[in-house]
Amino acid sequence: MANDFALMFERLQLPRDLPRVHAAVAPLAPLLQALLGEAACNEDGQLSVMVGSRAGQAVLLAPCRDQALELPLRLGEKVLWRQSLPAMRLTGGAQDGVGSAADALDLLARLRVAMPGRALVLSDVEVDSPLYQAVLRAREAGYVLTRNAPDTHLYHRFVDSYDAFFQQRSSKQRTQLRKKEKVFVERYGREYAFREYRQPGQVAEFLRAARAINRKTYQFRMFGERIDDDEASIAAGRRAAAAGRFRSFILWHRDQPLCFIVGHQRIDGTFEHRCTGFDPEHRDAAPGINCNILLLQRLYEEDRPRVLDFGGGDADYKRLFANESRLTADPVLLPRRWRFLLARSLYERSAWANESAVRVLKRLGLQQALKRWLRGTPP
C-alpha cells in the first residue's frame, strides 16, 4: 500500500506524451497550459518535462532540457576559459510538486541513474524548499555539489497602477527615479521613442538593434553574454512571437538604439525580464533606468502581466523596480566521474583565488577603481 503513495518520476515530451500526464491535479492545470504554450516556441514543437506522479495523478511538472554546463575560470570579472560539460537543466518548478526532502532526494537519485554521464543544473530553487534541502544532501544521491551560493531573486508584482507603485517606493527611490528621468529628458528632449516588438515580422529588426548595443557592453566583453541576429536566432524569436510569447523593447533616440530589453511573456501571466543592455556612450543620460521606467509603464497600460520576473541575481536597477524578493540558488550537481571532479576542482580554485584577490583589493581601497577600469566606466 505504501508504494501507491510513492512519487514516481519520468521524463516526457509535451504535447506528444500528453495522454500520459495522468489526470493532472487541478493546481497544475494552468501550468500544463503554460508548458504547452512554451512547447510551441521550440523548433520541433515539443517540450521536455519531468513528470512526477503519485497514486495515478501528476503532482509535478518541471521543464528540463539538455545543455552544456559551463564552469568558467575567471580573472576578476574576466572569463579566461569556459569548461564545458554535458548537463541537464531542471527548472525550479520541480520544487512546487515535491512535498518532502525524501521525495526530492529520490528525484535526484533517479536522475543520476538515468543520466550517469551528465551534470544536473537546477534553476531558481528556493532555499526553504524540500528540493533545496535534498540538494544539501546530494552525496546521498551520488552527486557532488558545487556552485551553490544562494542569491536574491527579485520580482515586481503588479498593483493598481504605475503611479500606485511609484508612491510605494521610499522617498530616496522616488527622488532617484525623478532625477534619472530629468537627466534623460534634458539630454534628448522628446526626440526618443520606446518601441515594443511582439510580431514575427518585427523580430529581425529587434535583434539587429539589440545586437548592436550588446556588442558595446561590458557583459559581452567580460562574460560573453551575447545577442545574435543570425538565422537561427531570428527563427527562434519568430516562433516565440507566433506563439504570443516574444515581447521585447528598445529605447531609441532618433535612429540610434540606446537600450534593449529581451522579454518573454508566459501564458501564466509572468513577464520574464531575460536580458538587458545599454549603449555605454550614453551612460550619463541613464538610458537603462529610463528604459525600465518606460517598460513598467507600458506593462501597466497594455496586456498587464501578473508578475515581472527579473531573474536571479541582485542589482541596483532591479531593486528600484522590484517589490518582492525570494532567496534562491542555482545549484550544480556533478556525477562522481574524474572529468567532472577535475572541472570542479579547477572552478573552485579559480573562485577561491578571485575571492582572496577581492578581499585584498577591498582592504587597499582599489576594488571599485579596478572594476570601473575593467568595465570601461569613467571615474
Image (cartoon, rainbow, N blue to C red):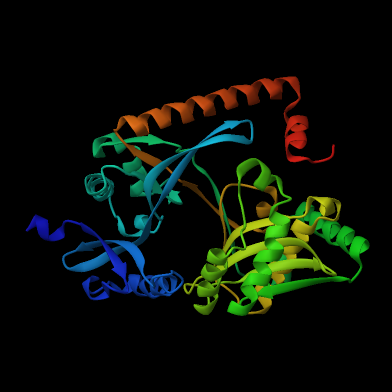
The residue nearer to you, when weighing 340 against 147, is 340
**Left-right relation of 55 to 187:** left
In the displayed structure image, the side of residue 82 where residue 49 appears, left or right: left
Image location (x, y in percent) of residue 118? 32, 44
Q: Quadrant of the C terminus?
A: top right
Q: Is residue 361 something one can see in this rendering?
A: yes
Residue 209 picture quarter: bottom right
Residue 377: quadrant of the picture: top right
Quarter of the image where the N terminus is located: bottom left
Q: Is residue 338 shown above or below 199?
A: above
Question: Residue farthest to the front?
Answer: 231
Residue visible at 41% across and 31% down in the picture: 344
Say left or right for 4 vs 123. left
| Image height of 194 relative to 333, above or below | below
Relative image position of residue 343 (x, y in whole percent): 42, 31
| Depth check, front residue: 232 or 38 | 232
Q: Is residue 167 visible?
A: no
Residue at image x 34%, y 41%? Answer: 135
Residue in the foreground of this view, choosing between 9 and 136: 9
Measured as percent of width and height from the top left, residue 17 is found at: 26, 72
> At 73% from the left edge and 70% from the top edge, which residue is drawn?
163
Q: Is residue 363 left or right of residue 68?
A: right
Given residues 320 and 65, the one toward you in this image is 65
Q: Position of residue 8 (x, y in %)?
A: 19, 58
